[in-house]
Image (cartoon, rainbow, N blue to C red):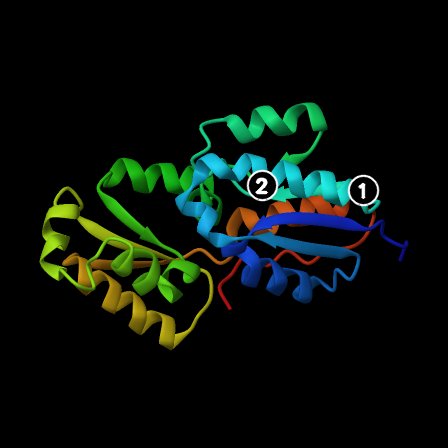
């Protein structure tokens, strides 16, 4: 097997566990992952600047092959406009829900029920902090009916099979007063895109999008 060139993925902290799992599964020792703070999810106007700074630092460290482990993530195209002249690619889609489900499947789900609150493994793990605490629902749970009155369901896009996460997803849906639906996506386009990026280094990859 040919020696692979070093690759750096500058990723959202919300994807750290998943990218590390994919890296381990494929034995991509040539791939380094650096993660930015997951709290940037709540401040999309700061994402582009943080990514550009990380790219500058990576190039100063000698990385030539750099990819960005973000979708658009609420930047309104700003991230794409900043990356295009640099020749750096990002993950496909508008957000992690889309690239986990894949674009066609997500579009179908959204058309079926626009008022859907989506969860991923990361959001299930951190639901209390990122949703309940940030919206004040831990103190005033009665506000859930107002905040989510236009929502009709919770869909958990499940990356891994974990009974503990399943229980937390049930808790999350109950806290919002909405029915829960679970859809197994595995790693979706996150896995396939990382595979494409890695293939460009001339090494073999394993493509396995099923939940684990």
Residue at x 71%, y 44% (from the top left corner): 197
Secondary structure beneath dot 2 equals helix
- In this rendering, does residue 158 appear at all? no
Quarter of the image holding residue 26? bottom right
Name which residue lies at 37% across and 76% down: 163
Which of 72 and 156 lies nearest the eye of the viewer?
72
- Indicate left or right for 176 with 21 as reference: left
Which of 42 and 199 lies nearest the eye of the viewer?
Answer: 42
State the separation of the CA atoms marked 2 and 1. 16 Å
Farthest right residue? 2
Label 2 belongs to which residue?
A: 50
Q: Which mark is residue 17?
A: none
The residue lying toward the viewer, choosing from 17 and 2, is: 17
Image quadrant occupied by the N terminus: bottom right
Asked if the residues shown at circle 2 and circle 1 are in contact, with their CB atoms under 8 angstroms apart, the answer is no
| Side of 146 relative to 123 (left or right) | left
**In the rendering, at what x and y percent does residue 203 appear?**
81, 52
Q: Position of residue 134 (x, y in %)?
A: 29, 55
Q: Secondary structure at mark 1?
A: helix
Q: Give x and y (percent) for residue 158.
A: 41, 60
Is 142 on the left-hand or right-hand side of 204?
left
Nearest to N terminus: mark 2 or mark 1: 2
The 10 Å Cα crowd at callout 1, few under 14, some 14 to 19, many 20 or more, is few
Residue 196's x, y, as percent? 69, 44
Q: Is residue 176 above or below residue 163?
A: above
* Residue at x 61%, y 27% (from the top left corner): 82
Q: Dot 1 corresponds to which residue?
A: 60
Task: Report whether 43 appears left or right of 21.
Answer: left
Say above or below: 208 vs 166: above
Residue at (46% x, 32% y) in the render? 75
Q: Within the image, what quadrant is residue 121 found in? A: bottom left
């Amino acid at each position: 097997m040919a020696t692979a060139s070093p690759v750096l993925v500058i990723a959202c902290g919300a994807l750290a566990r998943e990218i590390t799992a994919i890296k381990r599964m494929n034995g991509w020792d040539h791939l380094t992952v650096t993660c930015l703070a997951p709290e940037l999810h709540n401040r999309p106007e700061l994402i582009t600047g943080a990514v550009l700074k990380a790219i500058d630092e990576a190039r100063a460290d000698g990385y030539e092959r750099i990819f960005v482990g973000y979708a658009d993530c609420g930047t309104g195209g700003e991230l794409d406009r900043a990356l295009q002249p640099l020749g750096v690619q990002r993950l496909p889609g508008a957000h992690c829900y889309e690239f986990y489900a894949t674009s066609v499947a997500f579009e179908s789900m959204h058309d079926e029920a626009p008022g859907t609150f989506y969860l991923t493994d990361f959001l299930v793990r951190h639901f209390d902090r990122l949703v309940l605490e940030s919206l004040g629902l831990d103190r005033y749970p009665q506000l859930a009916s107002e905040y989510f009155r236009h929502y009709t369901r919770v869909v958990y896009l499940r990356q891994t099979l974990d009974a503990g996460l399943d229980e937390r997803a049930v808790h999350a849906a109950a806290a919002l007063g909405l029915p829960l639906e679970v859809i197994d996506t595995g790693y979706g386009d996150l896995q396939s895109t990382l595979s494409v990026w890695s293939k460009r280094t001339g090494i073999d990859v394993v493509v396995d999008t099923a939940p684990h």
